[in-house]
Amino acid sequence: MQSSEHFPELQTVTSDSLGALVDSIISVKNLTKTYASGFQALKNVNLEIRRGEIFALLGPNGAGKTTLIGVVCGTVNPSSGAVLADGHDIIADYRAARSKIGLVPQELSTDMFETVWDTVCFSRGLFGKPKNSAHIEKVLRELSLWDKRASKIMTLSGGMKRRVLIAKALSHEPQILFLDEPTAGVDVDLRRDMWHMVRALRETGVTIILTTHYIEEAEQMADRIGVINKGEIVLVEEKSVLMEKLGKKELILQLESPLKVIPPSLAQYELALSKEGAQLTFTFHAARERAKMATLLHDLAELGIGFTDLQTRESSLEEIFVSLVRPQS
Amino acid sequence: MNGHAIRAIYSFEMARTWRTLSQSIAGPVISTSLYFVVFGSAIGSRMTAIGGVSYAAFIIPGLTMLSLLNESISNASFGIYMPKFSGTIYEVLSAPISYLEIVLGYVGAAASKSIVLGTVILLTARVFVDYHIAHPFWMFAFLVLTAITFSLFGFIIGLWADGFQKLQLVPMLIVTPLTFLGGSFYSIKMLPPFWQHVTLFNPVVYLISGFRWSFYGASDVSVGVSMTMTLVFLALCLGVARWLLKSGYHLKA
């Protein structure tokens, strides 16, 4: 597994190790999906989603994110394995399982000729709930769709259509919400609105699973992050732990006078000179080698190497992500 | 049973019907009226009565069936094909709803529309032709059963079709010829003996024959056989629809 090669300290969390410890709302066990074409989209996936968390599923195109969501929600038939949603098997007990789940698909698939109000009410009925105008009004107001309730969907912008899809998914008061690329093609303001909405939903106890290409999104929102690549879960980790475990930190010093070479007594540090010797960069592991920063500064002082400016930089989730899914060379 | 879901699909589909009233009701009524005018009044006046029934009155059950069949098929096939085409089918697939409930919603709506249409056509025909209905109950029974059966058949076509062309293919190449050759405009007893036998393989013959019996008390094949064949075709369509939905054919990957 790539994660253990790049980052030996990481272990993939499996359902067995986690399932017994936490309250799982979704439990995926040994799930595989092979399409009729022979393409294996999911390879023995094990995953536990905790009740009430925001879980971000990251992965490159074709990694299996949408297939995994499709199986849980009932739009894709699994080849083997089992999925439980709030304790209900998604196949044997599909009514109970599906009534807990709301799905916002990636594609903007809407009934063009319907009004916003009708289409959201339709969704609620479809999920077996009696009419509840007050709830639909609340959902529409929260998504800033109330003024558009009588508009036909075809007249709405892409961002508004995305909101309609979210309103449909929330119409039946689900406990689990799947957002497949919720902010794809959405402008910055609307994206921030959605983040706000997702956080507010979580406050009400809804578990949210989102897939995204925007690392910033996962970094901003998620409690835990799962990375999927080529149909396999590469890792599942708390976002903060992931950042800490995998995050490289850089200390960048602007030197008073340029150095030609790095003094041999500093060989124990991972150092690099740039800007014709005027800039010294020390790369270290944010979690394990934090103390080394102080010792380096001390050693530099002893050698009489002064600096005019100091800067630190942490690696982003994006860099971590790229390093995880990058093909091995 | 998820009654709310059935009602949601049914209402959604019926709303589509009312929204496109001119296309879904007015269109078929006008085209059928043209048949009544041309074949009934104009040409029919020069034709001899069949089994004591004027030609204009004779073709009414067959023409009503012709519209009923075509409209049931096109309405039901379109109803399930459109969500597949637009992608909105994801919601139905992810909803806590059984295959039977999906069928009840979509086929129920398509059949309701056909029944309304059939009734409107019969009322319109009364303007042009003086006819009577000998067995109103059985007339209605055949109307309802045919509407349900062929809506179910259309639903299957909608599931099967992966393009608009296929959606048109079956109604155009199979159903329309079968209806025309199924005795809409003639009694099969007017055919040479060999073709009388061949024509018995056409399921539409039984529908039209039974329906015409309910009007005039005379039929090409016995009414019991007509009813049985209609029910057999209904059961067959139910089985196929169930199998298609269960396997996720053209719906789920």
Image (cartoon, coloured by chain):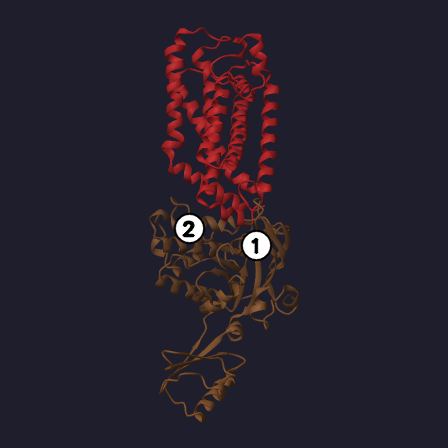
Chain colours: A brown, B red
Q: Residue at x 41, y 90 (%)?
A: A305
Q: Specify the subunit that label 1 lies on.
A: A
Compared with residue A22, is residue A250 higher up or lower down, i.e. above or below? below
Label 2 is found on which chain of the structure? A
**Separation of marks 1 and 2 at Cα, in angstroms:** 20 Å
Q: Quadrant of the N terminus of chain A?
A: bottom right
Q: Is residue A50 visible?
A: no
Percent of width and height locating residue B70:
46, 27
Please determine whether, in this image, residue B26 is positioned above or below residue A45.
above
Looking at the image, which is closer to me, B136 or B107? B107
Q: Position of residue A300 (x, y in %)?
A: 44, 89
What amino acid is labelled 1 in the image?
Answer: Val
Q: Nearer the viewer, residue B116 or A169?
A: A169
Instruction: Decide if residue B163 is in sight here.
Output: yes
Total number of numbered labels?
2
Q: Position of residue B30 (x, y in %)?
A: 37, 24
Seen as rendered, the residue at the extreme front is: A260
Vertical placement of A108 versus A306: above or below?
above
Type of the residue with mark 2: Leu
Q: Residues within 10 Å of mark 2 (few under 14, many from 20)?
A: some
Quick check: B27 left or right of B149? Answer: left
Q: Residue at x 48, y 88 (%)?
A: A294
| Residue with the mark numbered 1 | A72
- Determine whether the residue tagged by mark 1 lies in a helix, strand or loop: helix
Instruction: Determine which residue is flagged by label 2.
Output: A108
At x 36%, y 82%, the residue is A278
Seen from the viewer's position, the closer of residues A166 and A268 is A268
- Looking at marks 1 and 2 on the same chain, the residue that comes earlier in the sequence is marked by 1
Query: Crowding at label 1, few (<14), some or many (≥20) Cα neighbours within 10 Å?
Result: many
Check disc 2 and report its element: helix, strand or loop: loop
> Residue A34 location in percent, x, y?
59, 49
Whether A258 is drawn above or below B156: the answer is: below
